[in-house]
Amino acid sequence: MNFLLAATEPVVRLTPQARILAAVLAIAFMVLILDLIRRDKLLERYSIVWFLLGIGMLLGAIFPILLEWLAKAMGVRDVTIALFSVTLLILLALSLNFSVIASRQSKQITRLAQQSAIDGVEEESAETEEAEAEVR
Amino acid sequence: MERTLFHGSVAEKRAARLAHRHVESPASPGPACQNRSVKKLVFIPAWNEEQSIEAVIADAREHVPGADVMVVDDGSTDRTPELARRAGALVASLPFNQGVGAAHQTAYIYALRHGYEICGQLDGDGQHPASEVARLIEAVEEGADLAVGSRFADDVNPDIPEYRSTFARRLGQRLFSLLVSTSTRQTFTDTTSGMRALNVRAMEMFAERYSSEFAEVESLQQAVRAGLTVREVPVHMVPREHGHSFITPLTSAFYIFKTLVVLLIGQLRPRQVDQ
């Protein structure tokens, strides 16, 4: 029954200062995302995930019980560790996602470059043939 | 998505129109050639090769009569494309440097669209004598899907001096040969050779998917796994006249490591055998 002991020990929670700081940062983060969209620096489809992350941060700061549930579900006593682990996992998934997007786009760029190179040859050979026809 | 780019109706119609025109116009009074019916393309991938490109084009025209010569300019910043055009070659210019694989693939796509049946390729730096490429084309005419010129296989042409290489590069070559030979259960002695000839079947496969960074090595594995007949033909190559290889000891170690990973992943890919 040793494994149950961890849950009965006192939980390490976020301090009120930390919660206020997190809430302020979350709001600033969401304002930044909105501003980036407004100035056409960020496409909507890439912004949604960041916006959701901002909302998550805000909810975590306002309702500490959510983080405590999370920690309990993960089987860790310290709320901050649960928070760090989840954040790290989310960032890992996001950066992998961006690598996939970058690979797809680099393939598309190659295809476009090849298409443009081939178009160039075709145009040129059409022009030479026209020129030859004129000579005749 | 990617496929539609190349099978779009406008491009297709234009390609068909051009191909038709080629057929209609009686063959230009070129030198006598026994194989007039087989449409051949010899292409030269080139990135900043202004010092050697003209000689390479002339060599290709002399030794592969009846073939159209195309230079795939991989984003050169020097006079390579102008000189190539002046030397009478077709020039496909990639708008920016994309790596040798993308350049090869450009030529395959072009060749397929314009009805070429055999495609030969040689490097733009003058290392590959066109007379040897002509032998590779013969190998494809005799039934191989892909013929690869090897510097290290035995039986060589005595007219051209022996190819020299540094110890480190030879070591890397050996390692690649071992890896590719093991993975394909077929002996390959020169896996990084860019001197090749291929038929429509091989071009179609490479037009679909072709590694851009590890083109030469990975394509061998890909071809054998897809059930193509790959033949290695002993050839002579000449040491570079201008410029030097971008491979230095440190980067080559990393390159070998990356290639190892690529080959391992290639081994895990599903076999794409048709029929």
Image (spheres, rainbow, N blue to C red):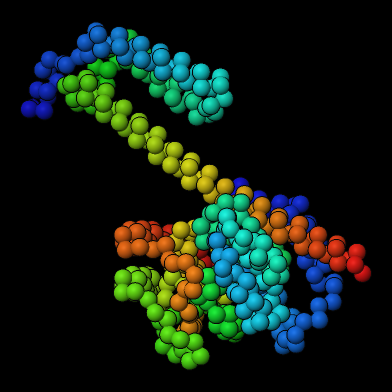
Residue at 49% across / 87% down in the picture?
B160
Nearer-the-camera pick, B217 or A66: B217
Residue B181: x %, y % from top left: 37, 74
Direction from residue B204 to residue B27 in the image, left or right: right
Nearer-the-camera pick, B22 or B64: B64
Quadrant into which the C terminus of chain B falls: bottom right
Residue B139: x %, y % from top left: 56, 83
Does residue B205 sit above or below A48 in this rendering? below
Residue at 12% across / 15% down in the picture?
A10
The answer to which quarter of the image holds residue B45 is: bottom right
- Residue B50 in sight here: yes
- Residue B175 in sight here: no
Please give the count of numbered marks on the rendered protein: 0
Does residue A76 sit above or below B188 in this rendering? above
Residue at 48% across / 79% down in the picture?
B238
Residue at 69% across / 65% down in the picture?
B85
